[in-house]
Image (spheres, grey):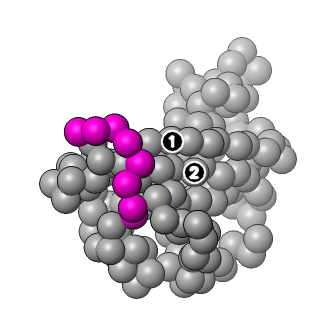
Amino acid sequence: MARSDFTFSHRLRVRWAEVDRQGIVFNGHYLTYFDVGFTEYFRAIGYPYPDALLAHGSDVFAKKAALEYHAPAQYDDELDLLVRVARIGRSSMQFLIEIHRGDTLLISGEIVYVNADPAARKAAPVPAFLREAIGRFERVAPQSGA
């Protein structure tokens, strides 16, 4: 995927507590970085997570996460988290995420979230306000799907 397909990026610096003895980011932290990117994406589209979604009677639950390692991040690296919504289904959204150090792709992956009624904790259609906000924000329109 081209870096230009991503409208959103967020920078973070690798902290000492996130690395192993060799100074390389411990693999479990990459999902935390994905979560940071997801949270900041929602802030960027005008709906800070979780409060803005909860105020509209929605929440999202992770359904699937996948990572592909290309190169390691190391202590004190400045990383760019790139996030985009690639697909919006009836009740789910597929987020594609890449982690870069400069021009080097370190990690790529996806997280699929299911929109849910927070009280019932059951899948619910992705609300129109969210579809519209994502549609306005994204440079490449998300695919629609079931």
Point 57% across, 26% down: residue: 18
Residue 34 lies left or right of residue 105; in this view the side is: left
Is tag 1's residue or tag 2's residue first in the polypeptide sequence? 1
Q: Secondary structure at mark 1?
A: strand
Q: Residue 42: within the magenta?
A: no
Type of secondary structure dominating the magenta stretch: loop
Disc 1 + disc 2, Cβ < 8 Å: yes
- The amino acid type found where label 2 is placed reads Val
Q: Is residue 101 visible?
A: no
In the depicted structure, whether residue 25 falls above or below residue 103: above
In the depicted structure, whether residue 86 falls above or below residue 15: below
Give the crowd class for mark 1: few <14, some 14-19, many >=20 residues within 10 Å: few
Q: Which residue is mark 1?
A: 62
Image quarter where the N terminus lies is bottom right
Image quarter where the C terminus lies is bottom right
- Nearest to the observer: residue 75 or residue 61: 61
Q: Quadrant of residue 5?
A: bottom right
Residue 112: assigned label: 2
Residue 31 lies left or right of residue 60; in this view the side is: right
Point 64% across, 27% down: residue: 28
- The span picked out in magenta is 119-126
- Residue 111 percent across, percent down from the top left: 59, 49
- The amino acid type found where label 1 is placed reads Ala
